[in-house]
Amino acid sequence: METTSRVGAQDAPDTVTAEAVPAARLVVDDYLRSPFPWYALDEAFTGPRRLMPLGTAADGSVQHGSIGHGDEPLVRGDSGADKQRFAVVVTVGSSPVRRSGDGTGVLEATTVSSAAWLAGSGLLACTWPPQLDHTLRDDWLDQQTETAFELADDLEGPAWSALSLPVDGVPVPFHYRESEFGWVLAGSAPGGVHIGAYGRGMSAYGLGFSEVKDVESYA
């Protein structure tokens, strides 16, 4: 992608390519388009943080995004992955049932289950059972993704337990589950958004969440 601008009567145009803009700046700009607030681990976490790719609707509106904390997740089974410590916080904008942008269908309302599903699928994306070879991982991932969807749709089921964690200093109930791959949790924030999270190597029991006041600081 290239844009061209002229200054005065110069014959040679100045060109600015997308590659000239730092990737982190582009991601921050996307996050600033969100109509809802973003959440991350609170100030008790002092390690590295990073913005991850956004989820958008067909019309380009921001639907959800994730903020990573600690190590950048490697696929489990790769060298060093089992020693990683990371947590990823997913923020999902709360929205009711609504028409799709092209008017041809209906978009489901976002709920706590939406956050649970995104967190569960996020954990699966950085998971690889060491007993499987590369050719079998797609089949395994498809099966586990379907299971994660079913679990997210049954938050009151036996796979989940209750966990209370602070959000902006206020105790909030979360649904929580563990597996051999890591942990997943999901709940709703007082600000009208849903929060999901997943991680490995860090205990979920000591976490707290807070609204991100300055997304610009991630640039």
Image: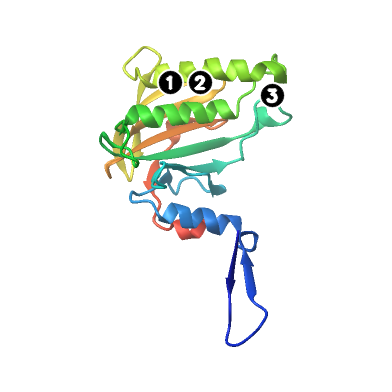
Q: Earlier in the sequence, mark 3 or mark 2?
A: 3
1 or 3: mark nearer the eye: 1
Residue beneath disc 1? 149
For the residue labelled by badge 2, is the local secondary structure a helix, a strand or a loop? Answer: helix
Q: CA distance from mark 1 to mark 3?
A: 23 Å
**Near-viewer residue (184 or 93):** 93
For the residue labelled by badge 1, is the local secondary structure a helix, a strand or a loop? Answer: helix
At 55% from the left edge and 18% from the top edge, which residue is drawn? 142
Task: Please identify the quadrant where the C terminus is shown.
Answer: bottom right
**Near-viewer residue (94 or 217):** 94
Q: Position of residue 186 (x, y in %)?
A: 38, 30
Q: Position of residue 1 (x, y in %)?
A: 60, 58
Q: Disc 1 residue type?
A: Phe
Residue beneath disc 2? 145
Numbered mark located on residue 203 in the image = none
Q: Is residue 180 visible?
A: no
Q: Position of residue 4 (x, y in %)?
A: 59, 71
Q: Are marks 2 and 1 in contact (CB under 8 Å)?
A: yes
Q: Are marks 3 and 2 in contact (CB under 8 Å)?
A: no
Left or right of 147 on screen, residue 160:
left
Asked which colour scheme the image uses, the reply is: rainbow
Residue beneath disc 3? 77
Q: Earlier in the sequence, mark 1 or mark 3?
A: 3
Left or right of 99 on screen, residue 84:
right
